[in-house]
Image (cartoon, rainbow, N blue to C red):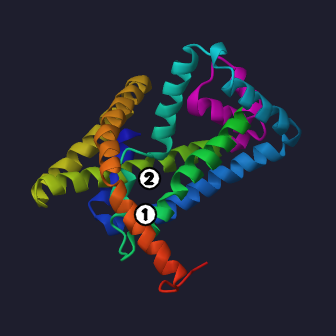
Amino acid sequence: MGIAIALIVGAVIIGGIKSIANVTDKLVPFMAGLYIIGALIVLAMNASAIPAAFASIFSGAFTPQGITGGVIGVLIQGIRRATFSNEAGIGSAAIAHSAVKTDRPVTEGYVSLLEPFIDTVVICTMTALTLVVTGVYTNPDLSGVTMTSAAFGSVIPQMTWFVTLAVILFAISTIITWSYYGTKAVAYLTNENKTAILVYQILFLVATIIGASMDLGAIIDFSDSMIFIMSIPNIIGLYLLMPVVKRELDEYRADLQAGRIQRTG
């Protein structure tokens, strides 16, 4: 599986940002739509259990002493998974958004606000509801994607393929995106040296194959550590750039109110 994904990703990332954009702008909406449709089917067939599911989620959220690790443990785990879900605060998504051609960077900032909402508020909430309304979350033998697959399959057995396909598409699009982040970092450090970029891309594909054969727990722990390290300089930079952001935002809003910018939508 790792070799197959590496071959697919390699065929895309060698093409550069245009190739990446052409793949992801079709892949991401499709996979998100596919997953949401599947979750809606599960929820529709368990509609009567949704109110109790929300009650269970809220009661669990506000009684952290009942969870191993207590308040601190819950906070740490929540932050780790939220950051992994939407990348908010670690500075990676800004690399992709910076490739957009616009004379008003603020508008791209507004667009980027949709990412945490769609990833975490919409998709993750729907996933949580499907796990609770179907009752699979109480099974100690299930975890992660196997639990989600069981939730979908409890309604229609064939729907496990929805989860399988969605996970594969999520994985490929994520790997493609992160390869681009690394490529831009290497390009910056080596002054756009093509050989260095190609070496990085090959090493990235090798790491993809190695990662597919490693223990999932070790990979998640390593990823969480790297994301945490990334967030430190980025958050410091955010505070330093706050005056610049405020100035750009004030100018944009003033131009919008004065009619110097054409409203859309």
Please tell me which residue is depicted at 17% across the width and 57% down the height of the picture: 187
Main secondary structure found in the magenta portion: helix
Neighbour class for label 1 at 10 Å: few (<14), some, many (≥20)?
Answer: some
Q: Is 3 placed left or right of 124 in the picture?
A: left
Closer to us: 58 or 211: 58
Observer-nearest of 172 and 122: 122
Q: Quadrant of residue 42?
A: top right
* Mark toward the start of the polypeptide (1 vs 2): 1
Mark 2 residue type: Ser
Q: Is residue 38 above or below residue 140?
A: below
Would you say residue 92 sits in the magenta stretch?
A: no
Determine whether, in the image, residue 160 is placed left or right of residue 144. right
Left or right: where 107 falls relative to 114: left
**SS label for mark 2:** helix
Residue 200 in picture, x, y percent from top left: 19, 48
Q: CA distance from mark 1 to mark 2?
A: 8 Å
Whether 139 is drawn above or below 196: the answer is: above
Q: Which residue is located at x 61 percent, y 78 percent? A: 265
Residue 178 x/y as whole percent = 35, 49
**Residue underneath mark 2:** 173
Is mark 1 in CB contact (under 8 Å) with mark 2? Answer: yes
Q: Quadrant of the N terminus?
A: top left
Residue 117, label in figure: none
Query: Left or right: 156 with respect to 219?
Result: right
Q: Does any portion of residue 133 appear in the rendered image?
A: no
Q: Give yes or no for residue 141 being in the magenta stretch.
A: yes
Q: Can I make out residue 108 in this image?
A: yes
The residue lying at 57 percent from left, 55 percent from top is 31
Residue corresponding to mark 1: 23
Helix, strand or loop at disc 1?
A: helix
> Which quarter of the picture shows residue 99?
bottom left
Magenta residues (range): 132-159
